[in-house]
Image (spheres, rainbow, N blue to C red):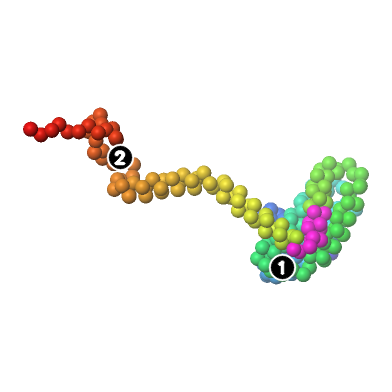
Amino acid sequence: MRFLLALLLLAAPAAAQKDFLTNDEADQLRIAQEPDVRLQLYLRFARQRVDLLEQLFAKPKTGRSGMIHDTLEQFTQIIEAIDNNIDDAIRHQRPIASLASVAKAEREMVAALEKYSALEAADRGRYQFALDQAIETASDSAELSEQDIRTRTHDVEQREVDIRKERETMLAPERKAELEKEKTKIEAEKQGVAPGKKRPSLYKPGEKPGDKTAPPPKK
């Protein structure tokens, strides 16, 4: 059964590998719309990667380091998807009841990964960075899931505000130029002058505004 699982996870189509999930896993997520159901699915997929890692570390052989590396990257992306789904549910005010179970499961998976980090293996250079990233990501995610929901809600809302401000700042110069053009156009229309053209002058050549030269008296 475990050998079959390994084949399913590592021999998935290229598109599925790029999306870090198998086609079957993606289909399951499309059906599941409730946040808690989706979170439990993601946890199951993450545990399957950890189970696969157990098999790979149990049998040192040529070429396994690449499989370990890819599996760790998939695991990390699944954990990131868990965080994104929780934040999205909070953003849309959808209730979540499984944060405690998410944190517990992630702590258990971190403990499993830390065992592999302590192993002395000749091929560890190929996957060590991916392993460190997986441990760090899962640890951070568990810490977030252990937060009071009100604290996390505030953090999510503040992050939205910061993103909005940054976006407005980036667009400010362009928007300012557009507003200046619009203002110039409106002023020109008020003066009865086509945009880009000067209003006809009532002064004679050489005269300036404020000149009070009186016309010669009539005889």
Image marks 2 and 1: residues in contact by CB distance under 8 Å: no
Q: Which quadrant holds residue 197? A: top left
Q: Residue at x 82, y 54 (%)?
A: 139
The quarter of the rendered structure image containing the N terminus is: bottom right
Residue 151 badge: none
Alpha carbon separation for disc pair 2 and 1: 62 Å
Residue 198 badge: 2
- The amino acid type of the residue labelled 2 equals Lys
| In the image, residue 29 lies in the stretch drawn in magenta | no
Query: In terms of secondary structure, what is the magenta stretch mainly?
Result: helix
In-image side of 122 versus 145 (left or right)? right
Disc with the residue nearer the chain's start (2 vs 1): 1
The residue closer to the viewer here, 69 or 115, is 115
Q: Which residue is drawn at 58% across and 50% down?
A: 167
**Residue 127 visible in the current orientation:** no
The residue closer to the viewer here, 151 or 81, is 151
In front: mark 2 or mark 1?
2
Q: Residue 14 at x, y = what percent? A: 68, 54
Q: Residue 114 at x, y = what percent? A: 88, 51
| In the image, residue 140 lies in the stretch drawn in magenta | yes
The residue closer to the viewer here, 97 or 107, is 97
Picture layout, residue 122 above or below residue 138: above
- The amino acid type of the residue labelled 1 equals Pro
Q: Residue 175 at x, y = what percent? A: 49, 48
Q: Which residue is drawn at 17% across and 33% down?
A: 215
How many numbered marks have been drawn onto this rendered protein structure?
A: 2
What residue is shown with label 1?
35
In-image side of 178 versus 121 (left or right)? left
CA neighbours of label 2 inside 10 A, class few (<14), some (14 to 19), many (20+): few
Span of residues in magenta: 138-150
In-image side of 109 versus 39 (left or right)? right
